[in-house]
């Protein structure tokens, strides 16, 4: 009886394996021979499928340590929810260089909510210098966002142009594919904003400017989404949120004797706002005696310490002074309000940040220990066979956050998308976006965060 049972079980397994293999084979539309430098991500984009669909058709890819190699022959499945055909389909190419034409014809566009979103990328996509390398990483993040959106039923058609610093962007705008775009991400350089802004207006294209360009066009062109915030605007936002969050504290300003510092603009503006609200504050100096230093603090309220420099040398000295003060007066409640540049010093100052309940204002926060960030890094390494650049912010994550927010918003709201807070329902990995309209002009990002290092050695991000 046991032998008969084993035979029946073996036969059942053989039938199951055969049926699974047949089902998989029926879902395969063709095979692809891997070429040099091709990646799983690039091949999935090439054939209009998701990474997971490609992996499902090639179970060996789930093997730990698997690497795609030149000469490998892999299965290309049919995309989900697409009718199958007996004829293999050819991959869709991504535009990388312009095809000049003598005239640009205005394209009539149907409602983008009912079709794929045509996305143009006009950034320096080369490895000649730092600009190009950073923008390649940003572009890869955009591609990863498009892949994630595809898995959620949102289709995109990417057209990319390598617009280097010495390029004449008008040449790229002659490409008929540019006028077909629903949104263009770029440019990187200020001199290119005006012609690209005019082109966006003429062709009813949304223009998403991702990096630091201070341009008049944002004030007059309603089609522009500008992520950049000038330092003066950032200071005003940081001061406003400081006043809203810490009006019940006792501010203590420490003069760090840094003659090169530009942070006096922030501290002066904050002091004026405190005075307008009749909130008392104290000013002390790093060179003050311990007794004089202590007199600037309030034993009955939480003290919020603000330095007038962001430099590492002065921060070290200030933290040493505060540590000495706490040893002498453990009853004092001390918090510190810092600067975005301090994020670069986290490796050396993390314990002090935790100890002194530190808040760092910024327009982004990269939590390298969060599960989402780790998953993103793993997928990036898998797709592109390289690690993210060691920079703040991480450019690939910036590209992912920007593209996911923007394209999902266009898919939901079409031309009425304004990028207002909370309307997309996307929690960023690193870079929050919250756009507000500038008068009758374009939209500018107003999102900021306070990165809070809690004494219990946890970190939280407060987004405004």
Image (cartoon, rainbow, N blue to C red):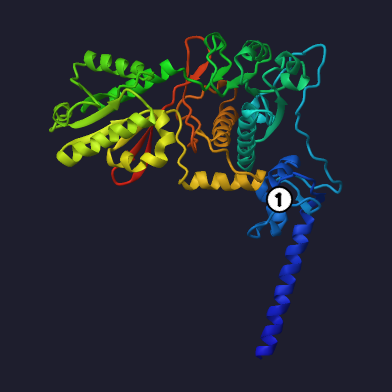
Q: For the point 51% across and 17% down, which residue is it?
A: 443
Q: Is residue 157 above or below residue 176?
A: below
Q: Position of residue 441 (x, y in %)?
A: 52, 11
Question: Left of 34 or right of it: where is 432?
Answer: left
Question: Left of 398 or right of it: where is 384?
Answer: right
Q: For the point 28% across and 26% down, which residue is it?
A: 306
Q: Is residue 78 above or below residue 140?
A: below
- Quadrant, the N terminus: bottom right
Q: Position of residue 371 (x, y in %)?
A: 48, 48
| Residue where numbered disc 1 is placed | 54
Q: For the point 41% across and 27% down, which residue is it?
A: 448
Q: For the point 46% across and 46% down, which residue is it?
A: 370
Of 172 and 410, nearer the camera is 172
Residue 134 location, quadrant: top right
Residue 165 appears in the figure: yes
Residue 464 appears in the figure: no
């Amino acid at each position: 009886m046991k032998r008969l049972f084993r035979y029946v079980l073996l036969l059942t397994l053989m039938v199951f394996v055969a049926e699974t293999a047949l089902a998989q084979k029926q879902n395969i539309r063709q095979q692809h021979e891997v070429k040099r430098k091709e990646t799983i991500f690039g091949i999935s984009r090439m054939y209009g499928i998701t990474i997971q669909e490609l992996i499902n058709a090639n179970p060996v890819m789930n093997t730990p340590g698997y690497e795609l190699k030149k000469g490998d022959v892999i299965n290309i499945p049919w995309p989900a929810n697409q009718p199958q055909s007996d004829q293999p389909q050819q991959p869709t190419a991504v535009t990388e260089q312009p095809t000049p034409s003598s005239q640009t014809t205005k394209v009539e566009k149907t409602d983008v909510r009912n079709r794929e979103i045509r996305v143009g990328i006009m950034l320096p996509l080369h490895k000649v210098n730092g600009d190009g390398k950073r923008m390649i990483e940003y572009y890869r993040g955009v591609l990863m966002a498009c892949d994630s959106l595809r898995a959620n039923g949102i289709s995109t058609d990417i057209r990319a142009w390598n617009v280097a610093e010495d390029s004449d962007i008008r040449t790229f705008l002659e490409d008929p594919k540019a006028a077909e775009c629903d949104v263009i991400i770029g440019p990187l350089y200020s001199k290119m904003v005006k012609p690209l802004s005019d082109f966006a207006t003429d062709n009813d294209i949304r223009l998403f400017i991702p990096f630091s360009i201070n341009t008049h066009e944002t004030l007059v062109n309603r089609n522009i989404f500008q992520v950049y915030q000038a330092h003066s605007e950032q200071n005003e936002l940081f001061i406003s949120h400081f006043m809203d969050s810490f009006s019940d504290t006792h501010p203590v300003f420490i003069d760090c004797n840094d003659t090169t510092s530009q942070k006096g603009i922030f501290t002066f503006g904050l002091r004026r706002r405190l005075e307008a609200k009749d909130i008392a504050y104290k000013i002390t100096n790093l060179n003050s005696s311990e007794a004089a230093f202590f007199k600037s603090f309030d034993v009955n309220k939480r003290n919020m310490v603000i330095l007038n420099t962001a430099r590492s040398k002065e921060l070290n000295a200030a933290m040493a002074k505060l540590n000495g003060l706490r040893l002498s007066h453990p009853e004092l409640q001390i918090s510190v309000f810092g600067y975005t540049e301090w994020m670069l010093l986290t490796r050396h100052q993390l314990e002090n940040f935790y100890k002194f309940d530190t808040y760092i204002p910024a327009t982004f926060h990269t939590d390298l220990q969060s599960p989402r960030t780790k998953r993103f890094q793993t997928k990036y390494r898998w797709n592109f066979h390289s690690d993210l650049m060691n920079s703040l912010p991480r450019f690939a994550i910036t590209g992912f956050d920007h593209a996911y927010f923007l394209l999902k918003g266009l898919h939901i709201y079409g031309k009425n998308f304004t990028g207002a807070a909370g309307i997309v329902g996307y929690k960023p990995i690193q870079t929050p976006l919250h756009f507000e309209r500038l008068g009758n002009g374009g939209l500018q990002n107003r999102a900021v965060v306070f990165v809070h290092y809690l004494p219990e050695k946890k970190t939280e991000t407060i987004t405004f």
